[in-house]
Image (spheres, helix red, strand yellow):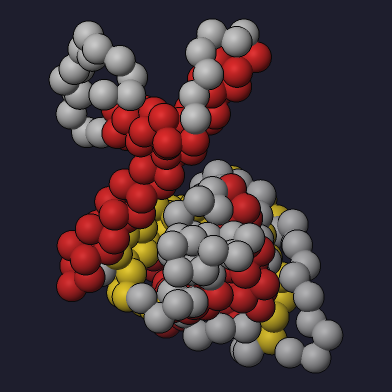
Amino acid sequence: MKNIQEKFIQPRNGWLMLFVSILGFMAGIALPIIFTESLGWAPVWYFLLIVTVFSFIAMFGLMVINPNESKVITFFGKYVGTVVDNGFFMVNPFVVKKTISLKARNLNSDPIKVNDKMGNPIMIGVVLVWRVKDTFKACFAVDNYEKFVDIQSEAAIRSLAGSYPYDDLEDEHADITLRSGGEEVNDLLEVSLSERLNIAGIEIIEARISYLAYAPEIASAMLQRQQATAIVAARHKIVEGAVSMVEMALQQLSEKDIIELDEDKKAAMVSNLMVVLTSDRAASPVINTGSLYQ
């Protein structure tokens, strides 16, 4: 394939050749009846044989091309061109015609097990929308372009999953994760697939991650870890809020000169407020009817 590129050709209309072929068959049937007695059998049958053979061979050059369909034409191993116009056409009957669909196709891959950047086994699947853009590459650059799409899409998934962590639990400094990357991860997948499938003349219309989860053997452990992380984060927020409320209470008591508390009473007040504000259960109040120093 030295500098050979896709080229489009416009073949002749096929209706004329169809009419000539039908006329030849009809002549082959009618001539023996008309000229047998005057010319004898031999000349008539010779002519009939020639007309029939040529008409039969010409029929192999007829082809129908539907919308969003193409025919790749080769003549004894030489690439002649590609026909993309739909209709009824006539070409050399000795050429080889290979049909290639130009329609958009879906590839919904089953989830496969791969390891993410941190080595955790995950299940990931993609949905891919693609179509043939270059019929010459699709026909001659690869052995089977449909299988090529399947294999390269799986390779792109494995490469993408191995380049990024599933989430930021283990890699807190990760800019992109598979779970939260969203459109950015999909764009990276689309670029990777376009580069891999360009050799086969395939255009990627859309690529999206359709399934993403931890592998079954670690899913339960990772769920517990996520829950524990969420609980710790919630506790952190609760304590942070409680500290700010206690600080605000002490500050307002001091600024408004409502009551003067020594360090021991401040410590006791802070302890009681922290218990009330951070407790999982509602605190039972105890009313002090005596002195604060009892």
Q: Quadrant of residue 176?
A: bottom right
Query: How far across and down, in percent of the image, does residue 273 sit?
Result: 36, 28
Q: Quadrant of the N terminus?
A: bottom right
Judge by depth and name the residue closer to the eye, 104 or 72. Answer: 104
Q: Residue at x 18, y 29 (%)?
A: 281
Q: Residue at x 32, y 75 (%)?
A: 121
Residue 284 appears in the picture as rendered:
yes
Q: Quadrant of residue 111?
A: bottom left
Query: How far across and down, in percent of the image, does residue 153 sit?
Result: 48, 71
Judge by depth and name the residue closer to the eye, 294 or 107. Answer: 294
Direction from residue 196 to residue 35 in the image, left or right: left
Residue 268 vs 284, above or below: the answer is: below
Residue 153 vs 106, above or below: the answer is: below
Residue 111 vs 273, above or below: the answer is: below
Judge by depth and name the residue closer to the eye, 279 or 187. Answer: 279
Direction from residue 232 to residue 155 in the image, left or right: right
- Disc count in the image? 0
Q: Residue at x 45, y 55 (%)?
A: 179
Q: Residue at x 72, y 76 (%)?
A: 80
Direction from residue 252 to residue 230 in the image, left or right: left
Query: How far across and down, in percent of the image, does residue 168 sit?
Result: 49, 61
Q: Quadrant of the C terminus?
A: top left
Residue 69 appears in the picture as rendered:
no
Judge by depth and name the residue closer to the eye, 248 or 173. Answer: 248
Query: How far across and down, in percent of the image, does residue 191 sit?
Result: 66, 64
